[in-house]
Image: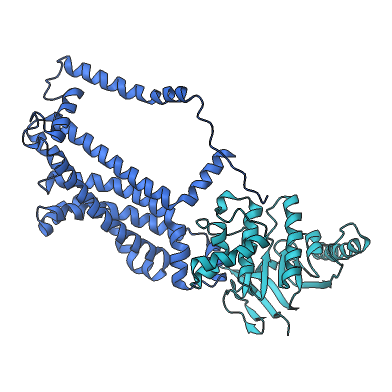
Chain colours: A blue, B cyan
Amino acid sequence: MTSVTDVSPPKPAFRLTRTLQGLERLIVPALLIVGWEAFARSGMLPPALLPAPSAVLHALGDWVFGFDETTQTYSGHWLRDALASALRVFGGFALASALGILAGVAIGWSRLFEKTLEPTLQMLRPIPPVSWIPLAIIWFGIADKPAIFLVFLGAFFPVLMNSIHGVKTVDHNLVRAGAMMGASGRQMLTDIVLPAALPSIFAGLRIAVGSAWMLTVTAEMVAVKSGLGYVLWDSYYFLRYDIVLAAMISIGLLGYLSDLGLKAIMARTLRWQQATTVQGRAG
Amino acid sequence: MAAIELRNIVKVFSDKRRGRDLLTLDNISLDIEANDFVCLLGPSGCGKSTLLNIIAGFEQATSGRTLVDGQQVERPGSDRGVVFQQPTLMPWLTAIDNIAFHLKLRGVARAERHHRAMEFIDLVGLRGFERHHPSEMSGGMNQRVGIARALLMNPSVILMDEPFAALDAQTKLEMQEELVAIWQRRRCTIVFVTHSVDEALVLGNKIVVMTRRPGRIREAVNFDLPRPRDITSPEFNDAKRHILALIREESTRLAQAS
């Protein structure tokens, strides 16, 4: 048992069959898009109310690259709009993550914080973040701040709840093992409890990044005059449903990319966990 | 001076939900000499793990005194290495980092930690696996890491709570042999909790037979059969017969009492 056996990955045989199998998952979306295109062109609904996928793609293309100004004032401004939204998402999410992890770990670890802090936070939790919009506008005006505030509210609670849960469910025996090896109170927290709670904290961060996009867009519809959400709502007023749909696609895409990035960071940080799944799959 | 002195240890668990107290350890007194390999043998629920946890400092005795090297035990500490029933390793650390965790807590630099941990990697036969995470190793290998981790602290006593109970029969035999070899080479004091008569006889040079709840010491048997021990020898069987008789006597007494 003292020799390491090399386990090489399976040979790339049948690569072609596998590529073809990969195409299976594209059948349903392709049929949907073709059907939608056909329905839109049939003229049963006015094109303004149901733009064809080709029209949406055209609007999106012009919004991004600005080739024929079909999107008028938005033509070629996609990057600016996307960046405005992304910065709000990032700002609120970063603030929520920092405070959520801090408060969550404190509540999970210390009885004192649990007794003093938790009841208040749990009472605020059921209040929908969007119901804060009126207050956010009086407090912060119409700009980035109310949006970041709303994003913070939406992203904070998932991080908080999962951090509390992660700390509370740390294997008691790991804490005993740490005490046996002479860990101080602070070391117990930084070297044992925190790493042990990380998988749960990351689960919270992934939920939070989704909420962050939802609330950025909501805030931009009401309290901000820029960003993808603003473009979406503004185009609705001008009955430009092609731009509305292009904005929806952009939000979906950026939200998906944010989650992908977070997943990549998680995979790097929690590499020790991946081994479990790989082994579980192998045997 | 004995390495471990237990004086009139009593442990009562209060069962709040049922509103009654449960006497788990009843007046245990025991001296364990330095370099002894003591096996605490008893049926499950006899309080042998509780006794070990009291020595480790994880639990407090209701009354009585626990001394390790003349010092009163108040809390867990690195002078007492514990090997748990489950390996209880930090899943995010590699084998070598788990073994060297004590050094990390003491602020030793990484290179120095790894250098010192390599000796223990070799001692438990894990060379080649030092960069593996616990999830990538078998139960037996993880338990070797657990043993190496306890040894690295160079504790005055090592407390083991049925560490081989979850292993298959063959791995268990291998590990028992290796543990005896390590004990002989490093001259340390080991307190080993087990419910297996054979395991106690293979490992210990002193076997403390405990009674069913409330836990008392039935008899402390000195067993100096030379090693490696032949488990089919008449001497081994004589000792086994004696210990089994003690246990049987105990169950008969309980059966009559009820």
Give the image location of residue B54, x and y in percent. Answer: 63, 73
Q: Which quarter of the rendering shows the C terminus of chain A? A: top right
Total numbered badges shown on the rendered structure: 0
Residue located at (86% from left, 67% from top): B226
Q: Quadrant of residue B228?
A: bottom right
In the rendered structure, the answer to whether residue A90 lies left or right of residue B122 reads: left
**Is B7 drawn above or below residue A266 in the view shown?**
below
In the rendered structure, the answer to whether residue A62 lies left or right of residue A31 reads: left
Query: Between A228 and B27, which is closer to the camera in this rendering?
Result: A228
Give the image location of residue A174, x and y in percent. Answer: 54, 62
Query: Between A236 and A278, which is closer to the camera in this rendering?
Result: A278
Q: Quadrant of residue B165?
A: bottom right
Query: Between A133 and B250, which is closer to the camera in this rendering?
Result: A133
In the rendered structure, the answer to whether residue A13 lies left or right of residue A71 reads: right
In the rendered structure, the answer to whether residue B146 lies left or right of residue A43 reads: right
Give the image location of residue B16, x and y in percent. Answer: 56, 67
Query: Between B188 and B19, which is closer to the camera in this rendering?
Result: B188
